[in-house]
Amino acid sequence: MQNKLELYRRVVPLAGLGIFERDLENSTIYWNPVIREMLEVPDDFSPVLEESISFYSDPQAIRNLIDQAIASGLPETAELELFTAKNNHKWIKIRIQADCENGRCLRLYGTMEDITDHVSLKNKLEEREKRFTNAFDHAPIGMALVSLRGEWIKVNLSLCHLLGYTEQGFLKRTFQDFTYPEDLDKDLSLLKQLVEGTIPSYSMEKRYYHADGRLIWALLNVSLVRDESAVPLYFVSQIKDISEHKRNMETIRSQNERLLNFAHIVSHNLRSHTGNIRMLTDLIVEEQDQAEKDSLVQMLNMNTGNLLETLDHLNEVVKVHDNGQIGRKALKLSAEVKRVLDILSASIRQSGAQITTDISEELTVDFSPAYLESILINLIGNSLKYKHPDRLPEILLQAAQTDGHVILQIKDNGLGIDLSLHGHKLFGMYKTFHKHPDARGMGLFLVKNEVEAMGGKIRAESQPGQGTTFIIEFN
């Protein structure tokens, strides 16, 4: 028995367990050395009842615990705050039981355990959780905790507002319900990689359905929370609305396309003008007949006037592009064709081309003057450029109104194009189909973009060696 008591005295300090006994019959209190160390009192300190209670920051709490133990006759436990003899703050866990006979409490005994570090850690975790909750709930971007099965664990108000739902309505749906179908596979693939540990986190642009049915562009950032054993617990998602950014980027893209389109118009149209003027000046220099020379000078004068008009049209394009629009005017198609034929007069004269037009003077199209000039210069210019080496060029321009649309056909007897081989890339950028020193592969690409920008359509019919017909439908 003595050995067991000795063992007990040795083990209890190792466990940091304070032991006390209060003898109510003799009004004595026993503390083991662990309690004295816990309360930072000397070894010869002799506590009395009120003095022992005064260590607690709330003396009434320890009195209530004692009364509860006496009343129940069972072990009672509490976590209480106290200040040591050296005024150091501590938390202790006290277990107490009363020994009663015939309705009288003879003694109280129990244990005390210093849990200051435990309480401090718990308070830090609670404070951290509180800060996280505040940051989560009041974040300016959408945030969500998502289960491994895609169910919402917690969502903040910003995310609910972003997609137009109440919190209750939101939590009834999975993230798949909100996701635009084309973006779902990529998201699920990245989630799989995240769970497998091949990536630490991921970001992607993703489309979500708003409650009213419209699509919202968002930047999604996802990370994965794991436990101490690296077992996946849940996903943390941050969702930021980038719809305005996407609209701005689309505007910039559109503006860049218009700028590039405008640059090509300038390049093609002005090159046609300057080439024609250069050709006329060469003819004037070489011509000996004064009457013919006067006629050429008149043509040159007319072409310089056309050049100035073209510059005015291009200036209008710049103005309407600044306003984010494309300028339209009611244009008499026959007059616009005649003007372009005048611009190309030197090339027509040099090639010996026969031009036939079948267009009513009353036929009008609602179109951009600069775009129409560019389209006609490109298509007629191509008919001259890619003429057949064995015959003079013949070009027919005819137009008619059908079902509210004006249909213009430009037909030539030139080299033609093998559409079975090149049809799919006929209007592609930098695509050329015949060898020519001036071929850039931009003309037909530019024509198609200009026709479609004005709401029209263009297609081609062609046979190698027989010629090509372009059919334009003006809206």
Image: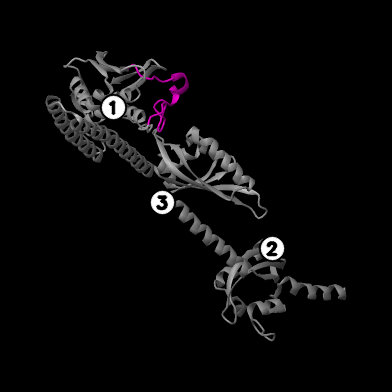
Q: Nearer the viewer, mark 3 or mark 1?
A: 1
To which quarter of the image does residue 312 belong? top left
* Magenta stretch: dominant secondary structure: loop
What residue did someone put label 3 on? 140
Of the pair 28 and 6, the residue shown nearer to us:
6
Of mark 2 and mark 1, the one earlier in the sequence is 2
Q: Secondary structure at mark 3?
A: loop
Of the pair 110 and 93, the residue shown nearer to us:
93
Q: Is residue 57 visible?
A: yes
Of the pair 114 and 242, the residue shown nearer to us:
242
Residue drawn at x 36%, y 30% as measured from the top left: 445
**Residue type of the residue flagged with mark 1:** Ile
Figure quadrant of the N terminus:
bottom right
**In the image, which disc is placed on residue 75?**
2
Picture coordinates of residue 78 (x, y %)? 62, 65
Of mark 3 and mark 2, the one earlier in the sequence is 2
To which quarter of the image does residue 440 belong? top left
**Residue type of the residue flagged with mark 2:** Pro
Picture coordinates of residue 208 (x, y %)? 45, 38
Residue drawn at x 69%, y 67% as measured from the top left: 98
**Residue type of the residue flagged with mark 3:** Pro
Of mark 3 and mark 1, the one earlier in the sequence is 3
Q: Which residues are magenta?
A: 412-436
What residue did someone put label 1 on? 375
Vertical side of 379 occupied by 180: above or below: below
Q: Secondary structure at mark 2?
A: loop
Q: Is residue 27 visible?
A: no
